[in-house]
Image: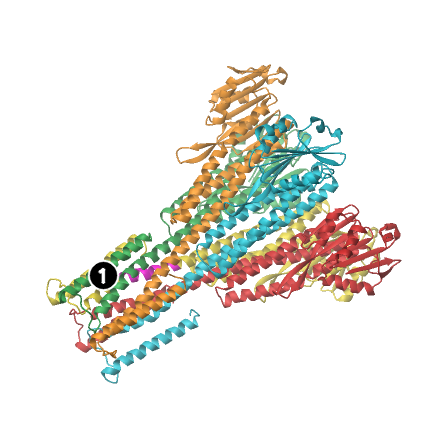
Chain colours: A red, B yellow, C cyan, D green, E orange
């Protein structure tokens, strides 16, 4: 779907068709062309009308691009990623948003999943001054919206990590290692997405590109700060997950220790008694304890109890029980 | 709460209201405006009177900013973090302090928790020359106070780590892993706070900003040194905690070894004796030892003792007991 | 095998022999000389006709060079690696492709395994305009082909890692550690190949070399993006394999725990019962349970069942069974 | 204690009092002022006579400074660390040495523990030309002495590590983990001391400061080389200690394996025999072996020996014994 | 031993004595002075005749220098390391080779172990043009020879690592950990030697020093490539050894698992049978199985077999046997 907004003399209107005359900066208009999941005929506007470089057009129309900002003759080509909730596996997914920023136009290309752009299109139909600050201000608006979309996803991830951490300490279970490793991958994936975006926005904030005015660089610096905080949170998550793995492994070892202690305590108490009963079961006359035949059992019982109590005292001293 | 100090002709006085004429550097006055947990009407001074950039005003009024120093037209915007003891969970917490440094004014914004600024306000009512060195000197004073506040917190953290280390070596306990990981997170958090502050102060010391004189850069270099030492201590803490985890895991393994040795020693000694008593309990005539019926027991007793002593000697040689 | 293509006035033709006059850029021709596994006499063209520096000739003719781009007087010497499937051990292998890029010629040297160059030679016999954009455009074409060749290999590697991951979680087996370490080496090897290539292509894209025009730098930037994405995938693989090792070690520990629990549960239940039978096998009169001689067994049976049920309840509470 | 040496016309003499006229470079004298653990009145010379910046004076008089070199107006302020043996805990300790290097003077401040400066003072009373090369040459002399002091301490550390390594492989003991971690901390501490000093000396060698002549920079380059070698040794120590921890953990695991093998071998051999004797102790008529009542025992003995030999053969095949 | 070669008018001859006139570049001669394990009188030529800086002379005559390249007034001082096989402990050792490179002379100092220099001296007696390209070309020749000497040593190391890897997977043995750690140190040592040499040669290749012509920089670039490949191999070795440690630890754990499984299987099968025989050995009348006194045994035998088969089936299902 192709949507065109054109601003002239401070009024923004939706235009049904793109007029080539607008490409002349001297025309005094600001144009925003939004291509949402463009069909092949719709996408021809990029090469035929705007004459963008074939390589950037190819990138803009292909699926998974790496975030980047590249200057071409007469325009700036930017790729950034938005984030959206993926119902299928309850995790987040990203979608490319591509920007062509010219002297008086902004072209955005995306696969139609971007809520930020849907809202902005809707907004542009009501706000007649949305384009009056020029294409870079509009770029900032979109980028700001995309980056704002990360925060709720990061918060959801944090909730999942909190929950997992609680489980590890309170209901340890060998199967948790799989969940820990899954979250680790999710966090590493998020980091891999954030870092290049931060670098792209940093370049916009540092005015690496001449089209960005001082005022606009202030705004991008603000977006950059948001991304730095998200990246910082992700680093904290990584530390926490590493700690969770350590805690999990420690749990496993402790449980083994506990199992072995039970075995050792039981064996060490019962084996001497079993030996004693074995001895008194031999077909060999044993020395008699004083007190007659019926006192024998109670002697043995007394010896056994002494062994049990002695062993228990020893284990208590070793802090095993 | 808004507090205004104005210095003219070497005398600092508290002013009830801000006079726009002071904004003119030619007025020859130095002004310090402190906003402690400002109400919304109070905070309007930032945008209405000082005309600060909306983005920096927004940052100054929002809660958790990342430490940074940014030059805007006509002023410098700095965010740093103070530290204060948090009663609720016996750990440290940070609070933002925001600075706007102009040619002849300093504006500070904070949430009212900062002891450094409370003391400085109190000090300014008595010392009439506190503003005579200009706003950057006052900035240094606040920053120095904030950074000095880190030392006692770092010392408390060190005490906790000392205590934990003692426990690990003297009273090993599986549950300690949780405490170790908690301290690890605390230390990582502290490091994450210190590093960006160090970078901000380093920029002030390196005179990245024209408003900082050589004399002032010397003072910030001094603050920078303090932060470097704190950061260095934090690195040492990280090494120690890593060592504690290693020691803890080694403890757990050693205890398992100890438990298994007890089981093995007891089993290995008692099982042959149990076999012997079993053999003499069989309903099968066994070869007799010389010496008559009553000598049989003593022969068996002698054999058993030989087995026991032999086993013990073997375990001693293996250094298991 | 030596193949020579020469383009003049927009027509590319295969030439049987190299004409020294072509070396003069003023001759207006573009030449591509491809040496596939050249014999020694064939390789003499490098030193005798082109007068390339002996060191670069030696590098071009030797087997395993590190990817690099070096400017020599009058030409650029580039080494890159193609990838091809190795039937012998079902893994990928690389082959060097060497390039000499002059003002109006491109010389390629390789061991004949490169499918990219075979296809390009075949293509050149049909497309008469293939050389009309000059030698750097042809260089880009070859480099693009080589880099495109990585994708299927990386995908195959990903399939193998997916398969291994599934095995680790579903059919854990101690022998898997060997396979994990083998894949780890494969991934590390791939990373070691990609990184220097990415650096070489990055230098071409950044126009470190004067022979590369802006238009050509755009194309190399595109190739660079491909390599960045491959390198990013390899990093993901490394993370996954590290996670697989963690999961594997955790599996091994869990299995030990499981084995020990079985031993402990069985021993702890049966040892008290064995002691009881031992006691009733002693040649010593024991106190009698009420109910006559034949009730004794059922008393003992009842006691045993109580012990078994009690133990099972305790193990259930400890979540061992 | 304050000691003053002044050189004029090639003769160095000890002076009882500092003459302010010497501060004028045109006076043609070279002065060395050494403050060993200065009293407060003695330390006033820094601020009153030399007019050093209050911040550098404060640093010079405070206890634990980080190594650094800072240019102030008219002088260079350097902090370095000497090393000395600490009797109390048989480890090394460091002490600050502070330097103020002016156009014709050197001021050294330290806590009196520095053997290097004690020797140099003693030397200056005999060598009348010691100051003739100027204050930077004297600075080099002190720095060289301080750095030379590291070598014997590093050698002692190496001896301790050698000894520990021998113990780990020859007399493994769980308690060694504590010693290993203690040495690890010592090595990390040494590294933390060396690195900033190396950086300071590197800046002197690279002539970051104008007061350092080419000749002097050669000398500091030499000191720098010494520090590089010490830092390199410390890195080797870190690797070795990491290896020692690995070896220790491997030892612990091996011992557990050994213990478990003994238990398993003994249990597996004796349990079938115990079962056999148990069976022949039952009050149930068993099938008889041929050969009459007295042959029964020898049959059972034969069966038992077969079991024992078979088991031993199996364990031998598994390489457990 | 001191050996002097002098080239004049394209003829190289060995000279018995050094002629000071040669030091004048205008003399038109090229000189190579080789000091092999020089005696003290021989080494005086460095300070007396060549007037080298005392610090570089001291470095050249001292034993273990770190690789470096330093410009002094009028000459370049370079230290590199050769490698040679050490019979005593079957490992490689390094020896320093020091170079003084002047406008028309090269001085080499070494301890006499260098085969490269022995061969070059021998070569110089036969090849009269060896010095005609000047001292830097000769320097390249020696450096090239030294670096070529690394390859066979690296190959030997690779063979040892291959052998060790095979052992770990095929004949695991706890003692291997010591060998693994020994190779790890050897590899780390090699890396520590290669890296600074690579940096020195890189500086020669990058023409950091004016004495190196473009042509010579090409040659050093070639040497640099060799070192890069050696360094790359060493990195691969490090990865492999890390993998070997992981595999070894995994082996140890697997063996423990195997031992424990045997114990558990044997105990779990025999303990119920022992209980059964114990029960039938009690002096208490048990309920009788139908079929008369002699059927009792066969009933018990049948129950036992059922237990054994049932247990084995369970262990088989758990994949323990």
Depth order, front residue of D25/D253 = D253
Depth order, front residue of E71/C210 = C210
Q: Residue at x 12, y 67 (%)?
A: B293
Q: Which residues are the magenta region? A: B256-270
Residue A82's place in the image compared with D114, above or below, is below
Is B269 magenta? The answer is yes
Q: Main secondary structure of the magenta part?
A: helix
Q: Residue at x 38, y 55 (%)?
A: E255
Residue B279 as seen in the image, left or right of residue D27? left
Q: Residue at x 73, y 48 (%)?
A: A55
Question: How far across and how far down the image is residue B129, in percent?
Answer: 74, 53
Image-quadrant location for residue E140: top right
- Rendered-image quadrant of the N terminus of chain A: bottom right
The 10 Å Cα crowd at callout 1, few under 14, some 14 to 19, many 20 or more, is: some
Question: How far across and how far down the image is residue C111, in percent?
Answer: 58, 37
Question: How far across and how far down the image is residue C219, in percent?
Answer: 71, 44
Q: SS class of the residue under badge 1?
A: helix
Residue A262 as seen in the image, left or right of residue B20? left
Residue A113 as seen in the image, left or right of residue E241? right
Q: Which chain does the numbered disc 1 sit on?
A: D
Count numbered badges in the picture. 1
Does the rendering let one see residue B56?
Answer: no
Image-quadrant location for residue A268: bottom left
Depth order, front residue of B244/C257 = C257
Is D292 magenta? The answer is no
Image-quadrant location for residue A313: bottom left
Depth order, front residue of E261/A260 = E261
Residue E267 as seen in the image, left or right of residue A2? left
Residue B315's place in the image compared with A291, above or below, is above
Residue indicated by mark 1: D304
Q: Residue at x 69, y 30 (%)?
A: C74
Does the rendering let one see residue A217?
Answer: yes
């Amino acid at each position: 779907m192709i949507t065109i907004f054109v601003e002239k003399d401070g009024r923004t209107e939706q235009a049904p068709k793109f007029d080539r005359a607008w490409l002349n900066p001297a025309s005094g208009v600001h144009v925003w062309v939004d291509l949402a999941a463009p069909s092949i005929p719709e996408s021809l506007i990029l090469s035929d009308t705007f004459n963008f470089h074939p390589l950037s057009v190819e990138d803009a129309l292909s699926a998974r691009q790496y975030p980047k900002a590249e200057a071409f003759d007469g325009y700036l080509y930017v790729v950034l990623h938005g984030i959206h909730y993926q119902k299928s596996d309850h995790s987040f997914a990203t979608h490319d948003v591509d920007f062509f920023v010219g002297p008086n136009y902004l072209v955005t290309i995306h696969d139609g999943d971007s809520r930020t752009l849907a809202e902005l299109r809707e907004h542009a139909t009501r706000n007649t001054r949305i384009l009056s600050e020029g294409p870079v201000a509009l770029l900032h608006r979109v980028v700001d919206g995309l980056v704002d979309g990360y925060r709720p996803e990061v918060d959801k991830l944090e909730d999942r990590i909190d929950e997992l951490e609680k489980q590890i300490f309170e209901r340890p279970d060998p199967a948790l290692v799989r969940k820990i490793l899954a979250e680790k991958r999710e966090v590493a994936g998020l980091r891999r997405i954030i870092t290049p975006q931060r670098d792209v926005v940093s370049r916009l904030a540092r005015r690496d590109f001449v089209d960005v005015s001082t005022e606009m660089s202030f705004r991008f610096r603000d977006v950059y700060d948001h991304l730095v905080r998200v990246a910082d949170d992700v680093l904290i998550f990584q530390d926490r997950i590493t700690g969770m793995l350590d805690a999990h492994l420690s749990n496993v070892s402790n449980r083994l220790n506990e199992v072995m202690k039970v075995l050792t305590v039981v064996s060490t108490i019962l084996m001497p008694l079993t030996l004693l009963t074995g001895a008194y079961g031999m077909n060999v006359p044993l020395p008699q304890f004083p007190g007659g035949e019926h006192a024998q059992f109670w002697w043995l019982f007394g010896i056994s109890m002494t062994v049990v109590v002695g062993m228990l005292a020893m284990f208590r001293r070793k802090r095993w029980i």
